[in-house]
Amino acid sequence: MTGFEFHALALPAALLLLITSMVLVVVNDWRLSLLALAVQYIGVFSMVAIHWPLVMALTKLVAGWISVAVLGMALSSAGTSSNERPAPAGYATNWKYISSVLSAWIFRVLAAAMIALVVVSMAPPIAGWISNIQLEQVVGALILIGLGLLHLGFTAVPFRIILALLTVLSGFEIIYAGVEKSTLVAGLLAGVNLGLAMVGAYLLVTSVGEEQA
């Protein structure tokens, strides 16, 4: 497929980025979060492939999936569920706990929806400022940056922080792909993704080791 053929996938890719980003903000299960992140990289690949050659765009997809695999292996080997606070015993009948979880879920959904509305209103003028970039690409990039920063503000858990940073970086790469087609830059950005995943894996493993010591 050529970049011209990927133009037709820009709108579905933007919707995919919106869905996966909201899943990352709302869902606490680390397996679902990693699955959403892996699917998100497919949407990012479709966006950057509009401007980059297919081989260069594939480096983003491969680096993203390797990052997901690194985080998944770290969580599996550490035997932890992303360091999230466990539910109290008998939580199924603890209505106070259930209502607090439901309230937090609703708040995150509404906050993510507000970010999405702001992005839709800001995307057309920003697309006019940046040449050689589609409106759908701007929408997808701003959604990743906005929801990634929102996610970053909601948590102090290392795993969640890494997910949020990877999301923000992907949004930046979509916009950057429209103005720069350097192979070296693509490789450096892929290295940054892998570096973040390595740091996240190290923090997860060491934090679990400290808890068990």
Image: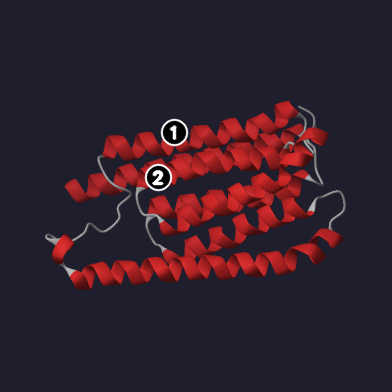
Tell me which residue sits at (86%, 48%) in the image: 132
The mark that comes first in sequence, 1 or 2, is: 2
Q: Mark 2 and mark 1 in contact (Cβ < 8 Å)?
A: no
Q: Is residue 118 left or right of residue 85?
A: right
Q: Is residue 97 above or below residue 61?
A: below
Q: Is residue 55 above or below residue 202?
A: above
Label 2 residue SS? helix
Among the 4 quarters of the image, the one containing residue 121:
bottom right
Give the number of callouts. Answer: 2
**Residue extending furthest left?**
90
Identify residue for label 2: 32
Which quadrant does the N terminus fall into?
top right
Q: Is residue 98 left or right of residue 116?
A: left
Residue 32 in percent (x, y) is at: 40, 45
Tell me which residue sits at (45%, 40%) in the image: 35
CA–CA distance in space, label 1 to label 2: 13 Å
Q: Nearer the viewer, mark 1 or mark 2?
A: 2
> Badge 1, how many Cα within 10 Å: few under 14, some, many 20+?
some
**Which amino acid, by three-letter code, is at mark 2?**
Leu
Residue 145 in percent (x, y) is at: 61, 58
> Badge 2, how many Cα within 10 Å: few under 14, some, many 20+?
some
Among the 4 quarters of the image, the one containing residue 97:
bottom left
Among the 4 quarters of the image, the one containing residue 119:
bottom right
Task: Compare residues 125 and 207 and report the one nearer the observer.
Answer: 125
Tell me which residue sits at (45%, 67%) in the image: 108
Tell me which residue sits at (64%, 42%) in the image: 44
**Which amino acid, by three-letter code, is at mark 1?**
Ala
Answer yes or no: is residue 213 visible.
no
Label disc, if present, on residue 69 of the rendered structure: 1
